[in-house]
Image (tube, rainbow, N blue to C red):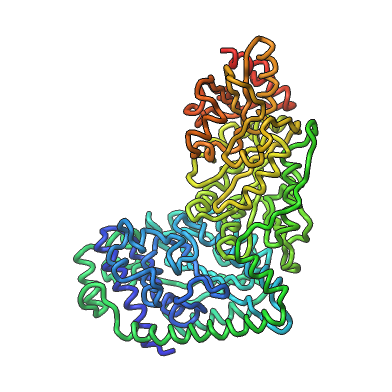
Amino acid sequence: MKKENLDKIALTVRALSIDAIQKANSGHPGLPLGAAELGAALYGDILKHDPSDPKWADRDRFVLSAGHGSMFLYSLLYLSGYKDVTLDDIKTFRQVDSHAPGHPEYGIAGVETTTGPLGQGFATAVGMAVAETMLAARFNTAEDTIVDHYTYVLCGDGCLQEGVSSEASSLAGHLGLGKLIVFYDSNKITIDGSTDLSFTEDVAARYRAYGWQVLNGSMYDYDEIFRLIAEAKAETAKPSLIALKSIIGKGAPHKQNTADVHGAPLGADEVAATKAALGISGDFFVAPEAAAYFKTKQTEWKEIHEAWQKKFEAWSKKNPEKRAEWDLFYSGAYTPADMPRYAVGDKIATRAAGNKALGAIAAANQNLVGGSADLKGPNAVGFASTPFSKNDRLGRYIHFGIREFAMAAISNGISLHGGLRAFCSTFMVFADYLRPALRLSALMKQPVIYVLTHDSIYVGEDGPTHQPVETIAALRLIPGVTVLRPGDAEETAVAWEMAMENKGPTVLALSRQNITVFQKDDPDWKNTILTGAYIVKKEDNPDTVIVAAGSEVNLGLSAAEIAEKNGKKVQVVSMLCRELFERQPAIIKSAIIPPSARVVAAEAGVKCGWEGLADAVFSIERFGESGPADKVAEHLGFTAEALQLVVSG
């Protein structure tokens, strides 16, 4: 590797970044100008990847956690030969339909995860490193190592100030993820100015306390960068943080090392001055030496990939059972399980029913991994597996600790890595802690399963801080998230299977309290429920239809019984998933909810979202109280008798 080649790559990164951001009149030039040498070293020499096959299973992963510096990544993907990012995309940076959007977006070849919300890229990369260790333990043999790659991250001061990176870093150190290498772009500048305004901690000491190896060097010394990476790789029992001292906006003579260069175009005068200082002529300059160098590298990368493929095929012949399992893992297909069965009248909390379903599914699907935020018992998400740890990489249960946000982001990373299905769990009220990562699950269409228990005021004694009256409505608002709130144990088993077959994120909203398994008048309800709803209690030409979710289905059945004594004909519908139902054609909707009937929706939460479906909503428009569950419901007027009054109009 000649320093001259790396210099030309770094120069091209700076040139493309300057012009793309200036043309868009929007963007963040500080990072790509300041970290161009690291990019040259990584993509020019360090990374094991093949741009002609961006999904190669054993590629190294690179995550730009500081996603605002996206032109850093796009420049390098273009130079490396990733077909998804062309020079035309770079010239239309931040424009509609460009493959160079404002922040990196998953789905563009070479972009491993959507980043931009600071800290989440870092935490997601921890999940990728977890997945690598799990798969290596499962598939590598004494003779053949077929899973052997690194996860690299570039983060900045902003990423390290966000709490999610602290949560994830703490867990990564605890788990001893030695193949996770994080580069810290230490330029001491954020949007408001010097980091001295708000961030004066000893970052190195913090990471050593987390159990990381901490190394220090210069962003602009290639030999030192290569040495530090080698040192990081030599430490197999700890993740490594490589702090590289840098100058934000390096090369811009009047703006480098200032907050002005962080998040705004340089401006025409500064662009001209920077190009003059760097010796660049013309717009969107690509150094011929850099282009020629990467042409050669593309051949080398293919040869490395082909050598791995030969080793993989040899391993497959020696280990046909492992190969079959590998193919199954990477197919993403759900293997149907022997699900638990229940009888009408059984009383069981849906969280407990969920645990029985999880156990069956995990036994049939060995690539299902996950855990909870220190709530294994209360969430009822234990299954037959040892815990994943630094001493047991075959463990499938992850003790995430009390780290909801990192837990969800790490689950995204496990899913994005490929080969594994991920679930995570906490109390529903704490979904607010993890919501930003759930939002990214939806953006990236990742099939992460969120098991959220203790779903209503029936939490009881823990009181209003733990009674999520508004939370499920907020979760339903996220586009692309499938929210399933089953009404009894039988529905819970089906809901778990739906989650496993879903191509995007799923929330399973489960109860703390016992719920009675009810009679279902629809003989084909297990298929009908896939529309989002089905008829539990059928009436010909009903006056009223009660549409209920979760534990309120039983409440609706009780209210219907009272109303019928008063001469009302009441049909009861279980609404497992409102969003699924709303997408159904009119013929299906009208078969379940007759248009001529008055509709009353019932749910132990706020009415937000039910208004368009129902003529009246039986809801709770306030926070709860502390006390036994039934007493809380009675105190709030949330009873079958009160619902019957609404039904009777």
Residue 294 in picture, x, y percent from top left: 39, 83
Q: Identify the image quadrant of residue 165.
A: bottom right
Q: Quadrant of the N terminus?
A: bottom left
Residue 60 seen in the figure: yes
Does residue 63 appear to the left or right of 2 in the view shown? right
In this rendering, the answer to whether 527 lies above or below 604 is below
Is residue 491 positioned above or below 158 on the image? above
Nearer to me, 473 or 324 = 324
Residue drawn at x 42%, y 71% as measured from the top left: 246
Residue at screen point 48% across, 62% down:
65
Visible residue check, residue 635:
no
Farthest residue in the bottom direction?
Answer: 2
| Whole-percent x, y for residue 293 in the image | 38, 86
Q: Quadrant of the C terminus?
A: top right
Count how many numbered circles sit on residues in the image: 0
Residue 67 drawn at (x, y percent): 43, 61
Q: Residue at x 71, y 72 (%)?
A: 137
Tell which of 538 and 125 is nearer to you: 538
Residue at 75% x, 69% y: name it: 391
Residue 519 place in picture, x, y as percent = 73, 30
Residue 410 vs residue 596: left or right?
A: right
Left or right, 119 with reference to 285: right
529 in relation to 175, above or below: above
Q: Quadrant of residue 32?
A: bottom left
Task: Determine the image quadrant of residue 263.
Answer: bottom left
